[in-house]
Image (cartoon, helix red, strand yellow):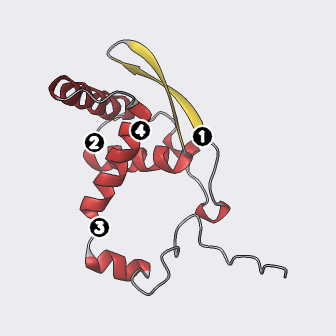
Amino acid sequence: MSSDGNNRFHTDQSMGVSPLASRTLKLSGRDVSIRLEPSYWEGLNEICQREDLTVEELCGDVRDRMEQQGRRAPQAGVSLANALRVFVVGYFRQAATERGHARAGHGQGRPFIATPFDTVPAARES
């Protein structure tokens, strides 16, 4: 697994939503620029650490699988960035358990707890 500065993508979730961050990856010998939100880059880095892959290997695998699916049933307009977002969410959804949700404080009518949106909304002026 490479050490390509993964820590530079660590975000402070209390800061809310961040602008897109671009990275250029070498996929099948070609430079490919991908723009994702920092939290998705962070998620990809975590997945790569768990699966002992580089970001380039994982993104290349996602791209290859996306192309294979496209040959069977063409899906116009699906970018690699969108496919990576779907992959990250799917990966972590598969890892989520009831016990993990309980530890995170989920299921108490407070869906924003421990997310980038976990802030108290400002009172509206009438």
Residue beneath the point at 40% across and 44% down: 85
In-image side of 42 versus 17 (left or right):
left
Q: Which residue is more in the foreground, 30 or 35?
A: 35
- Name the quadrant containing residue 117: bottom right
Task: Tell me how far mark 3 sits from mark 1, CA to CA.
Answer: 26 Å
Going by the numbered disc 3, the residue's amino acid type is Ala
Going by the numbered disc 4, the residue's amino acid type is Asn
Q: Residues within 10 Å of mark 1 (few under 14, many from 20)?
A: some
Task: Tell me how far mark 2 sits from mark 3, CA to CA.
Answer: 20 Å
Task: Tell me how far mark 4 sits from mark 3, CA to CA.
Answer: 21 Å
Which quadrant does the N terminus fall into?
Answer: top left
| Eye-nearest disc, 4 or 1 | 4
Which SS class for mark 2?
Answer: loop
Q: In terms of sequence position, does the residue under pointer 3 or pointer 1 come before the other? A: 1
Going by the numbered disc 1, the residue's amino acid type is Leu
Q: In terms of sequence position, does the residue under pointer 2 or pointer 3 come before the other? A: 2
Spot the residue most to the top: 29
Q: Residues within 10 Å of mark 3 (few under 14, many from 20)?
A: few
Q: In terms of sequence position, does the residue under pointer 2 or pointer 4 come before the other? A: 2
Residue 98 higher or lower than 46, as above or below: below
Q: Which residue is mark 1?
A: 20
Residue beneath the point at 31% across and 35% down: 58
Residue beneath the point at 68% across and 78% down: 120
Residue beneath the point at 26% across and 30% down: 66
x and y, in percent, of residue 14 in the image: 63, 66
In the image, which disc is placed on residue 52? 2
Task: Tell me how far mark 2 sits from mark 4, CA to CA.
Answer: 23 Å
- Name the quadrant containing residue 20: top right
Q: In terms of sequence position, does the residue under pointer 4 or pointer 3 come before the other? A: 4
Q: Which residue is mark 3?
A: 96
Q: In terms of sequence position, does the residue under pointer 2 or pointer 1 come before the other? A: 1
Q: Which residue is mark 4?
A: 82
